[in-house]
């Protein structure tokens, strides 16, 4: 056992190489009772700070991989056995059951704790569909977003903007006990969020491709089978996305994908939601925060990394011109050994922080990819490479010892390609169904009597106390520091014209400006020498003299 003294009178206890596979316990000096043990699977990263005398306990756990910040009944991602449970139901059974659970049923299950009966499901669907319409100002906001903006950024902006359209949902404006006293207020936000997020996502896509928005359907269960299919939650989304009634088989594929994506326990995004919700923020801001966390490169960028890896692998195999599938498999094994095993590079789409067995979501998504290939009659060579790569990895003892198994990110980007969605829609495709899980966690946090405002601690390792010194006594820092601006940085280069215009002497030396710009600059310089009462008139004259906008 190794010990290190840190600033603030803390002792850091870290498992050495010899202690990795052993059970380590921390005992309280005051009571002599066992206070902490490292029973987690990843024992190497077990780190704890033992307090010195009269200091509170602080656990140093970077990224909080071993810290449970809440107790939850919503979802149990059983990483040891490779299972995912929604309120006790195996998600693979929900997808593969004979009748097949709909996404609306799973959302009801996550939020209410039980599967709905027929009457409750009909009412649930009607309430969700009745809240799918967006305020015209939200639609106007979506129309003004640049066509090349990332869809996830647009989704975050619109969902967060809902907070300003529903101030009655904000406890800061209506009282801290708003949701504790009003069940109706809580339910209203559930229907709004689930109903509107799919509409916003579809409008984001339509705005990006330069097409008009498609209004949502409002009544479930009327008309023929195709019409009823169009107004299911998933069918309604696909209809708003494309402008026509979707194929029933496509709706089934997307619906089952959304079921396995509806929640994943307390991951980064859900943890961010719980963190913000603990302050009493309204649910729209909380969900927007979770979406912002999902927008991060380490989540939303994984899909592109997987496709890039598969494209490189496919090009390598194609270049070899091998005669048989067995030869291709050997080629892929050699490629993985040279490219990933020896340099110890991360194999995209494999391995997971929580799942130490085959990711159950990956099993479902792999089957959905195969169904999509048949539906669209598309062989998709990258899917074939992914299947071959999975076979190689699962048959390699090197990966087996390290518990590297396929995860959800191996097949999800391939499914998006097969259904005709670009990879930049990856995070949006996950965020829409995940809203059901986020809402469930938001509600659970409201009912948790132990929940107070989240306040993580830190171990300060910076400078000790220092005295302030005047400007003339300071040591030169230079322009290359963390807060300095390098001469050739983009920010400095972009501000050169502004700096030039701000300098009167240098402004007169610029000969390439237009005649009107010269007159405008001269008027501004003259205005500063006039009394304040005259400046208003000079501004008016300058405004009248300005040429019309082009």
Image (cartoon, rainbow, N blue to C red):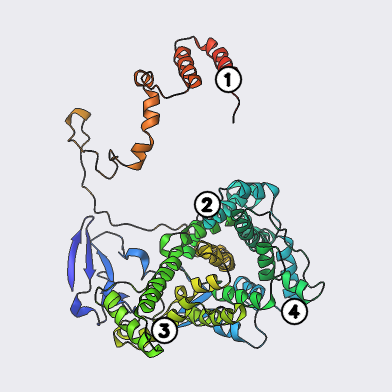
Marks 1 & 3, CB-CB < 8 Å contact: no
- How far is mark 2 from mark 1, CA to CA? 34 Å
At mark 2, the secondary structure is: loop
At mark 3, the secondary structure is: helix
> Within 10 Å of the Cα at label 3, are there few (<14), some (14-19), or many (20+) other Cα atoms?
some
Marks 2 & 1, CB-CB < 8 Å contact: no
What residue would you read off at disc 3? 388
At mark 4, the secondary structure is: helix
- How far is mark 4 from mark 2, CA to CA? 42 Å
Quadrant showing the C terminus = top right
Identify the residue at horizontal 48%, vertical 13% (top origin): 527
What residue would you read off at disc 1? 543
**Closer to the N terminus: mark 2 or mark 1?**
2
**Closer to the N terminus: mark 1 or mark 3?**
3
What residue would you read off at disc 4? 118
In this view, the mark in front (3 or 4): 3
Identify the residue at horizontal 41%, vertical 84% (top origin): 388
Residue 47 x/y as whole percent: 27, 69
> Which dot marks residue 149?
2
């Amino acid at each position: 056992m190794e010990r290190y003294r840190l600033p603030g009178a803390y002792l850091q206890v870290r498992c050495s190489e010899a202690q990795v596979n052993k059970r380590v316990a921390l005992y309280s000096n005051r009571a002599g009772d066992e206070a902490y043990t490292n029973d987690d699977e990843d024992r190497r990263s077990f780190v704890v700070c033992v307090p010195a005398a009269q200091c509170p306990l602080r656990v140093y756990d970077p990224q909080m991989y071993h810290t449970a910040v809440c107790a939850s009944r919503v979802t149990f991602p059983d990483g040891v056995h490779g299972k995912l449970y929604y309120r006790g139901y195996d998600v693979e059974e929900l997808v593969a059951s004979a009748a097949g659970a709909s996404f609306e049923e799973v959302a009801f299950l996550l939020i209410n704790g039980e599967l709905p009966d027929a009457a409750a499901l009909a009412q649930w669907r009607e309430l969700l569909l009745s809240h799918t319409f967006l305020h015209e100002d939200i639609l106007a906001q979506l129309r003004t977003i640049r066509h090349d903006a990332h869809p996830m950024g647009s989704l975050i902006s619109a969902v967060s903007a809902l907070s300003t359209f529903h101030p009655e949902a904000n406890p800061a404006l209506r009282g801290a006990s708003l949701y504790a006293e009003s069940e109706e207020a809580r339910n209203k936000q559930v229907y709004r969020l689930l109903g509107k997020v799919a509409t916003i996502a579809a409008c984001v896509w339509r705005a990006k491709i330069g097409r008009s928005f498609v209004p949502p359907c409002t009544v479930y269960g009327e008309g023929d089978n195709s019409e009823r299919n169009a107004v299911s939650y998933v069918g309604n989304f696909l209809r708003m996305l494309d402008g026509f009634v979707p194929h029933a088989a496509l709706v089934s594929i997307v619906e089952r994908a959304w079921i396995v994506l509806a929640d994943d326990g307390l991951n980064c995004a859900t943890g961010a939601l719980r963190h913000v919700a603990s302050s009493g923020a309204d649910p729209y801001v909380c969900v927007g925060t979770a979406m912002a966390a999902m927008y991060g490169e380490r989540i939303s960028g994984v899909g592109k990394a997987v496709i890039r890896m598969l494209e490189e692998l496919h090009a390598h195999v194609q270049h070899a011109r091998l005669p048989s599938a067995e030869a291709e498999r050997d080629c892929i094994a050699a490629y993985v050994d040279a490219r990933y095993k020896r340099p110890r590079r991360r194999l995209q789409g494999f391995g997971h922080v929580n799942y130490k067995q085959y990711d159950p979501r990956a099993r479902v998504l792999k089957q959905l990819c195969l169904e999509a290939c048949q539906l669209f009659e598309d062989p998709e060579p990258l899917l074939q490479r992914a299947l071959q790569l999975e076979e190689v990895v699962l048959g390699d003892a090197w990966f087996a010892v390290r518990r590297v198994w396929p995860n959800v990110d191996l097949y999800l980007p391939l499914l998006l390609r097969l259904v005709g969605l670009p990879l930049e829609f990856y995070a949006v495709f996950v965020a829409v169904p995940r809203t059901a899980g986020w809402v469930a966690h938001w509600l659970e946090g409201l009912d948790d009597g132990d929940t107070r405002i989240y306040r993580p601690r830190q171990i300060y390792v910076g400078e000790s106390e220092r005295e302030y010194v005047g400007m003339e006594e300071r040591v030169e820092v230079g322009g290359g520091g963390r807060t300095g601006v390098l001469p050739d940085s983009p920010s400095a280069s972009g501000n050169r014209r502004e700096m030039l215009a701000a300098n009167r002497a240098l402004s007169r030396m610029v000969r390439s400006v237009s005649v009107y710009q010269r007159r405008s600059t001269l008027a501004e310089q003259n205005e500063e020498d006039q009394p304040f009462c005259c400046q208003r008139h000079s501004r008016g004259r300058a405004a009248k003299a300005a040429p019309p906008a082009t």
